[in-house]
Image (cartoon, rainbow, N blue to C red):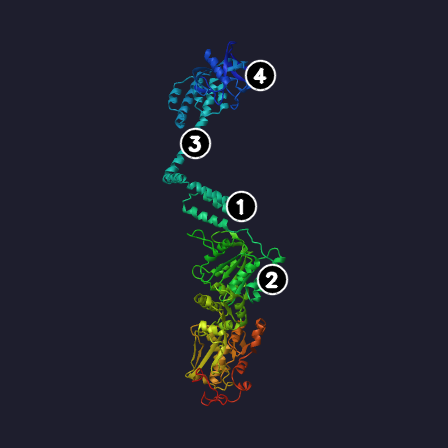
Amino acid sequence: MAIFKNDGDDPEEGVEETTTASGDNVAPLLPLRDIVVFPHMVVPLFVGRARSIKALEHAVAGDRELLLSAQREAEKDEPGEEDVYRIGTLGSIIQLLRLPDGTVKILVEGKRRARIRGFTQSDPFFACEYETLDESEGSAVEVEALVRSVHAAFETYVKLNKKVPPEMLNTVAGISEPSRLADTIVAQLNLKIDERQHLLELVDANQRLEEVFGLMQAELEVLQVERKIRSRVKKQMERSQKEYYLNEQMRAIQKELGERDEFKNEIDELEQQLKQKKMPDDSRGRAQKEIRKLKMMSPMSAEATVVRNYIDWVLSLPWDEYKDEKKDAVEAERVLEEDHYGLEKPKERILEYLAVQTLVKRMKGPILCLVGPPGVGKTSLGKSIARATGRDFVRISLGGVRDEAEIRGHRRTYIGALPGKVIQSLKKAGTSNPVFLFDEVDKMSMDFRGDPSAALLEVLDPEQNHTFNDHYLDLDYDLSRVMFVCTANVLHQIPRPLQDRMEIIQLPGYIESEKLEIAKKFLVRKQVEANGLKPEQVEFSDGGILELIRRYTREAGVRSLERELASICRKVARDVVKQGEAFQKVRVSPGVVKKLLGVPKYRFGEKEKHDLVGVCTGLAYTEVGGELLQTEVSVTSGRGKLQVTGRLGEVMQESANAAMSYVRSRAKQLGLARDFYSKVDIHIHVPEGGTPKDGPSAGITIATCIASALTRVPVRSNVAMTGEITLRGRVLPIGGLKEKLIAAHRGGIDTVLIPSDNEKDLRDIPAKIKRGLTLVLVEDMDEVLQHALAIEDPGGFLHEGDHLLDEIYETPSAATADIPHSPAGVN
């Protein structure tokens, strides 16, 4: 009889069932965890709970039947009546085996579906009254079709699912009963407990078989997709099988050697460093991306080394690390005065910067360029600036640099690529606001590899260097708080765009008194200590130091002076070792200097002792400071040839031509025949021919020499001059006036002729120099000749009367007949 029954304790409502009622159907209950037993199913079970073991013992003692029902929650060790499903399977114990650990292993076979009607006892084990459920079937044709479909599907399922043994296919093929077929197949499907319980509760065989068929179709679709995936993966493995297996072997070897673990530890360490590092967000994101890339690589690959080096560079830079600056201007001034004598302009500029820094929270670092001859203290001044401001100091020498990658770095595509010198030096400094010295910035050159001076434009531009981009890092780095200091010997060799970005501070050469003070305060003490002497063993007198300055050195700085002091200290040290206890203190006087160093290398005072014809003293500005420049002119019979020697540059040769043109234009005033130049050859020579010379400032010197040689009037030996000449005889201003006047003072010159337009530069000349020289401001060449030529009436020399020489040198001038002339004069 088919009925629908709903028990008050049964959560499953509306289950259609056919029952066979019997009041004697009572059996012990075995609650099951994570398994549902179906009819016709033989399954081993392990039983460990005391209540369940007692139920088994009772069943074995009787007819060996018991009721098998699944727990709703497998986690409960002591289930209650409400914790088991009401529909279960009536089973029979085939075999029971007690194990040493107290558990019991049984082999049970499911017989029929059964429904629990009620519990008769719960202690010492569950016993319940049950009723078996009779199953119903549909029409024979429908059942036959369904059975065939299930057989076909199961055959495909077995082929795709390797977990089902092939023998099961033969077993299922021999089953034609729909109920048994469904219960047999459901045990082979991968289903959840609630899905299995649902199928157990279906008493309609056709419906149960149809649901099993649907579940099997869904499983077949999953298995077919898995098969496609496995096939695709297999093809990919075949393409890269060799590489795959080699990598697997490499990983196994690395694991055995511990290398992979070490590599993983290094990556973990890099990630930890990145978390602790203060840096901009874009740089942090780039570093994280590179670390993720590194994780995917083999530690032995070349690319992994490149990525690792890049990450190391990014993490080692002081992105947001700044050193506290000293803003005490008084202390800074003390430090600068302690380290350097003189150099007032750069000291004043540094103190101005510190004063502004005190008033402004943050200002862009200044970019200074110290220009001056060697040995005047440019590089050491950079160190003093760092000490005075409390910053770190880094130095880059740019002498001979011709590759722009030295500044901006190489791109990572190149083997052995590195960041540029700027980034490397910041890493070395450890802070982002050091004093950065670019030494010898005028010594850079360029070739096919690029122009490093152009690369410096971004570094030294306050409007751009807050986003300086190194080719290697490819990240923006803020250089705006770096204090850049550049040094150079000459300004004209620095490209104009680069000059425009820097604040130029000229450092002139030291005068004699300044060198004396520097030697007494710094150099002597330094060399005495460096050579192992004590102050009580050697003493330098002012006269001895002046003897070194005047007769053993000729320079704008003090390097040669320091070398000569070191030479004397070494000789004294030798006597100390040789004489031992008998050694007596040495006082270095001018006589001792000559005794220790030998014959003086230079004459003190370069001026000529006598007034000579065709010989004039000019003033030149070189890399080592100011120099006296002797110029000679010789006039011989010829055909108007002008010859210039002494390694003169193009500009200086043009000045010689301009001077000659001026003299020709003033032939009448000079007392020369109108066509004098067609009958003589003029040779202009500037001694020390091994030294290149150039520049326009020798124009009036050459013109004076030519006029002296042609008129046979000597030039005053105590007069020096400098200035550019025009064709009309105007005297134009020149540069390097301070250095030139220092050279004139050092050389014993009394009078210096300078362009009147240079009057504004006299304020920078030391007072001692101005007191020791007579400075004459001239506007045209006529004034120069009046002051330079040794004649009694200079005002009447350039007259416009009769020619003194109607035919060149046929009748000597009355004014010059008795004046001696040098061999460099007229032959």
Q: Is residue 426 visible from the viewing direction of this image? A: yes
* 238 relative to 706 in the view: left or right: left
| Residue occupying the far right of the picture | 359
Q: Secondary structure at mark 1?
A: helix
For label 4, count other residues whose C-alpha is less than 10 Å away and answer few (under 14), some (14-19) or many (20+): few
Q: Secondary structure at mark 3?
A: helix
Residue placed under numbered mark 2 in the picture: 352
**Residue 608 disc label:** none
Disc 2 to disc 1, how far (Cα)? 37 Å
For label 1, count other residues whose C-alpha is less than 10 Å away and answer few (under 14), some (14-19) or many (20+): few
Give the amino acid type for the residue marked by disc 1 in the picture: Gln
Point out the image quarter for the C terminus: bottom left
First in sequence, mark 3 or 1: give its number. 3
Give the amino acid type for the residue marked by disc 3 in the picture: Val
- Residue 107 coordinates in the image, percent (x, y): 43, 18
First in sequence, mark 2 or 3: give its number. 3
First in sequence, mark 2 or 4: give its number. 4
Disc 2 to disc 4, how far (Cα)? 98 Å
- Residue 177 coordinates in the image, percent (x, y): 42, 17
Residue placed under numbered mark 4 in the picture: 8
Front-most of residues 332 and 174: 332
Give the amino acid type for the residue marked by disc 2 in the picture: Glu
- Say which of marks 1 and 4 sits in front: 1
Residue at 40 percent across and 33 percent down: it is: 230
Residue placed under numbered mark 3 in the picture: 225
For label 3, count other residues whose C-alpha is less than 10 Å away and answer few (under 14), some (14-19) or many (20+): few
Q: Secondary structure at mark 2?
A: helix
Badges 1 and 4: C-beta atoms under 8 Å apart?
no
- Say which of marks 3 and 4 sits in front: 4
Front-most of residues 753 and 559: 559
First in sequence, mark 1 or 4: give its number. 4
